[in-house]
Image (tube, rainbow, N blue to C red):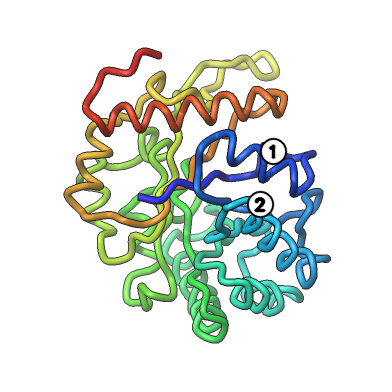
Amino acid sequence: MKYIMFTKHLQGLDLAGIAGALNSVGVEGADLCVREGYPVNPENIQTALPDAAQQLADEGLSLPMVTGPGELTRPDLEYADEFYGVCGEVGVKHIKIGYWPWNRERHYWDQVAEARKLLEGFQKLSEEHGVQTVVHTHSGTNLGLNSCAVMDLVQDLDPSLVGVFLDTGHLSLCGEPISMALDIVRDYLSVMAFKDMIWEKRTVGGETVWKSRVVPMGQGYVHWAEVLRGLEAADFEGHVSFHSEYSGQPTKRVVELARTDVEFIDVTLNGEEPAF
């Protein structure tokens, strides 16, 4: 497995700061958040992404993955072709697109059919530019929220062009047991997202609701030993994106927590009992 880190919660850092943070965490490269408000975004991607790739390389870091804006759910968006083109030129392997929320006013299978048509368009972009589109399994009312649901979207597409980005945290909330989840998507599995999550009760507007929250690895619902055994059995050698989605924490603390997460996985891989 090759460790990378999602840079969403490093917002506010310039590229030099991001590179320093990644090296401090102990990962090999970036799952670079390319969105409005970040050093690289859809408006400046033509020049900023090549510069970012070079700056990361100068610090011994790779750029195998880019996470696009949440609105990147249509291949005919004004900037989509340029976005894919620049990613292909700098050697990005995977582009994570956005999500299709389920609309309770419409039939599920009609929405799946529409999403599949859009994915066919992304497949064409992937083929043209040499970058794989990946669909992230995200809990909540999203199409593709777990392994079975994401296969509704990608089945029969070319797995070299459209893959699955399987997320341990979200699967722990609404997915299959991890060994089963890996088996379901095995022909399409491209990237893993590592994070741990819990459900917790909150009071919103006087009403008690359940909300999900990311917690440090080992403190949530994910059975990490089973995750790592399953990936070993599947001979998974791809990229693992440490999501480090510690919202509300200062950047320095996000880096510290991400470093601890990497250490947790290394210890668990060695069959030891984590001391944290």
Query: Quarter-wise, where is residue 48 in the image?
Result: bottom right
CB within 8 Å, label 1 to label 2: yes
Residue position marked by numbered label 1 in the rendering? 10
Residue at position x 67%, y 79% from top? 81
Quadrant in the rendering for residue 112: bottom left
Residue type at numbered disc 1:
Leu
Q: Please report whichever mark, 1 or 2, sits nearer to the chain's N-terminal start.
A: 1
The percent coordinates of residue 272 (x first, y second) are 24, 22
Residue type at mark 2 is: Cys
Circle 2 — which element?
Answer: strand
Compared with 73, 156 (above or below) is below
Question: Which dot marks residue 159?
Answer: none
Q: Quadrant of the C terminus?
A: top left
Using the image as rendered, state which of residue 204 and residue 99 is in the foreground.
99
Residue at coordinates 41% horizontally, 64% vertically from top-left? Answer: 109
Residue 203 shows in this picture:
yes
Q: Position of residue 154 (x, y in %)?
A: 38, 68
Q: Is residue 163 left or right of residue 229?
A: right
Q: Mark 2 = which residue?
A: 33
Residue at point 38%, 58% (across, down) = 150
Q: Nearer the viewer, residue 89 or 112?
A: 89
Taking 250 as reference, is 142 left or right?
left
Residue 238: x percent and y percent?
Answer: 37, 57
| Left or right of 117, for residue 191 | left
- Position of residue 139 relative to residue 62, above or below, is above
Residue 35 relative to residue 215: left or right: right
Gap between marks 1 and 2 measured at Cα: 9 Å
Q: Is residue 100 visible?
A: no
Judging depth in this view, the residue of 70 and 55 nearest the camera is 55
Label 1 secondary element: helix
Residue at 56% in and 67% down? 92
For label 1, count other residues whose C-alpha is less than 10 Å away and answer few (under 14), some (14-19) or many (20+): many
